Amino acid sequence: MGIPAWIGPYRVQRLLGAGSFATVWLGHDPALDSRVAIKVLAENWSHDLRVRERFRDEARLLRRLDHPRLVRVHAVGELPDGRPYAVLALADGGSLRDRLAAGTPPVPPALDLLDEIAAGVAVLHRERVVHRDLTPGNVLFTSTADGERVVIADLGLAKALAAASGLTARAGTPGYMAPEQDDPLAVVDTRSDVFGLGRLGLRLLGGPGPRPHLDGVPAPVVAVLRRATAPRPADRYPDADAFRAALRRAAGPPDDPATRRPGRAFPAGEGRPVSRAGSAAGRRVARRLGLAGALILVAVGATGGDATRPTADGRWGRSGPVSVLLPAGWRAAGTGWAGRYDARGRLEPALVVSPDPGRWATDPTMPGAFVGLSATLGRWSTPADFVAQRPHADCVAAPVRRVRRGATVWVVARFTCPAGRPVLVEAAARAGRAGLLYAQVVPPPGSGPDVVDALLAGVRVRPG
């Protein structure tokens, strides 16, 4: 295969990859002085009008969705021979297929990665689009100013749900393709993508094959993957959001009542309530939180001191390397972020600060904040993306702003809500190599942005 010197106005540097439908080249955009990926329809399909239109549909779909969890389209064009091409944002971190070639990751980061993949597929499902070809080669990694992000690629087989069934061509990759995709008369919908997510999960956790062996994987997680890959679509989760919620419950601490309550999903990114030392009061709080769909609680364990003791004004609340300067009259509780684990399988650090940490999760009038640090989230998400995942649809959002406090730049979104907590603030920041800092703040009634900014200014991360 010869290397073209130019594709449209883009100088071609080298081949990135070739498949049955398209070839992808590394190109340079001289106008913006940046590298791009240029996807060109393969020559053997150039005279098939149906395939050419499918190629263009992919570019149109990506352009319409324009989401950071999906590969972005910069431009489209046509070669002199009539073949269409699309100029895409370069995923310079390679693919999941490349990384799996070097071995499977430990269980906690593998589950975090599967969660991120499901979040990308959920973007499609909310737009009533089914991908139909979820494979390790279609999960890409792209560098950002803050680290790295997972993006979903290759929507060439994607279809709107209204047109995803009935006399469609066989489409998908063996091993990841749902059984119904092999039947041109079968209904292909979001449950077909759930099957693909389940197969990706098995591959990430080292259990491919017809009878996977998942040594060291928690039994609830295995049950989620088995349901996701059920032969009958009716036996699977209905869509990627439902799969992701079930996976989060299954990956939670084993003594978490919420993980034993089927059908109860927690909002994306939020932790789950865990009682302290199995106390009856703690279990009652956990039950209330599970039924109410609480915001965030942390798992309080025995990792260094009693964080629930009263703290004098101006003192610090701490959880591992995370410290928060406490406002006057506030206390701290918590030593771990429920459902978030580091590479060694330990809970990542987090704490709640409030005048009454025990009431903060259940009393909408109680001000306070959850502050957590996640190294795993830091590898897959940026602060802006993490905040964008918390839209609070029933609330009115103020413009997102950035707050610099020393070397830390916080991305801050403030919501005014008609019910429950009247004001809710979501904030995230990069904490150097330590990962992603996240804060969810309920400010005191009547307070302005300066109160939230002061609290964020008091968050510190001790170098590891």
Image: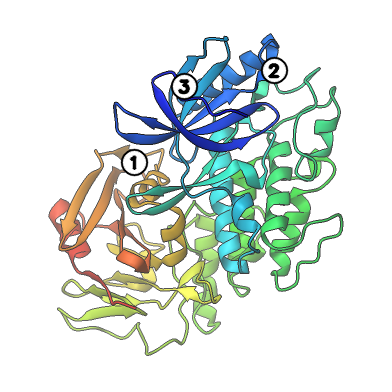
Q: Nearer the viewer, residue 174 or 7?
A: 7
Residue 350 is left or right of residue 425, and the answer is right
Within 10 angstroms of label 2, few (less than 14), some, or many (20 or more) residues? some
Q: CA distance from mark 1 to mark 2?
A: 54 Å
Label 2 vs 3, first from the N-terminus: 3
Label 1 vs 3, first from the N-terminus: 3
Residue 148, percent across and down?
A: 43, 52
Q: Quadrant of residue 190?
A: top right
Residue 331, percent across and down?
A: 27, 77
Q: CA distance from mark 2 to mark 3?
A: 18 Å
Q: Residue at x 34, y 57 (%)?
A: 364
Within 10 angstroms of label 1, few (less than 14), some, or many (20 or more) residues? few
Label 1 vs 2, first from the N-terminus: 2
Q: Quadrant of residue 51?
A: top right
Q: Residue at x 39, y 20 (%)?
A: 9
Q: Amino acid at mark 1?
A: Pro
Q: Residue furthest bottom?
A: 305
Q: Which residue is mark 1?
A: 418
SS at mark 2 in the image: helix
Q: Amino acid at mark 3?
A: Ile
Q: Residue at x 60, y 29 (%)?
A: 23
Q: Nearer the viewer, residue 354 or 207?
A: 207
Residue 136, percent across and down?
A: 65, 47
Q: Which residue is mark 2?
A: 45
Q: Nearer the viewer, residue 71 or 127?
A: 71
- Up-down: is 171 above or below 248? above
Badge nearest the viewer, 1 or 3? 3
Query: For residue 7, which numbered disc appears in the image?
Result: 3
SS at mark 3 in the image: strand
